[in-house]
Image (cartoon, helix red, strand yellow):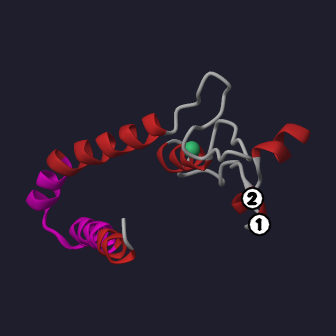
Amino acid sequence: MDEILAATMCDAVYGRLDYLDRLVTDADEPSRAALADTEISRLTRAWRDLLAAHQPDEHGRCPQCSGWRRPRQHPCSVWTTAHQHLIAADGPPAATSGRHAAAAGRPTVAMLGAS
Ligand SMILES: [Zn+2]
């Protein structure tokens, strides 16, 4: 995928998310009800597809996030993000794995295991 196509895809996805955010905040009640009928199932399908791609392999590693030289143990950042937003959204930030979480100062799975 070339850079222009990738940028176009990113713009389209962010545009769709912006559109849905505007509908949630600005639309009337019937429009929001229609939104729930169509978009919630679309978003749950998207989450399921994404999580399926990040299911751990027989070694407990994420096949998408692991590199040849650097295996990534389950749960990867996709799973921890899903848990944070779908389960723990009203609580404190969930522990995540990986260098990005550590760099952001968020608790990591390794830090919680050490306590
Ligand atoms: Zn992953």
Left or right, residue 68 beside residue 16: right
Residue 50 appears in which quarter of the rendering? top left
Q: Which of 86 and 50 is in front in this view?
A: 50
Vertical side of 23 occupied by 88: above or below: above
Whole-percent x and y of residue 112?
82, 43
In the rendered image, which residue does mark 1 sit on? Answer: 103
Amino acid at the residue labelled 2: Arg
In the rendered structure, find residue 99 and report the number of the disc placed on it: 2
Asked if disc 1 and disc 2 are in contact, CB closer than 8 Å, the reply is: yes
Q: Residue 56 carries which label?
A: none
Q: In this view, does 111 lie to the left or right of 2?
A: right
Say which amino acid is labelled 1: Ala
Q: In terms of image quarters, where does ligand 1 lie?
A: top right
Q: What element carries label 2?
A: helix
Q: Which residue is drawn at 37% across and 71% down?
A: 2
Q: Can residue 26 be seen in this view?
A: yes
81 or 32, which lies in front?
81
Q: How crowded is mark 1: few (under 14 residues within 10 Å), some or many (20 or more)?
A: few
- Marks 1 and 2 sit apart, C-alpha to C-alpha, by 6 Å
Q: Where is residue 8 in the image (x, y as percent from the top left)?
A: 29, 74
- SS at mark 1 in the image: helix
Residue 93, percent from left and from top: 65, 54
Determine the residue located farthest toward the left in the rendered image. 30
Question: Residue at horizontal 51%, vertical 39%?
Answer: 54
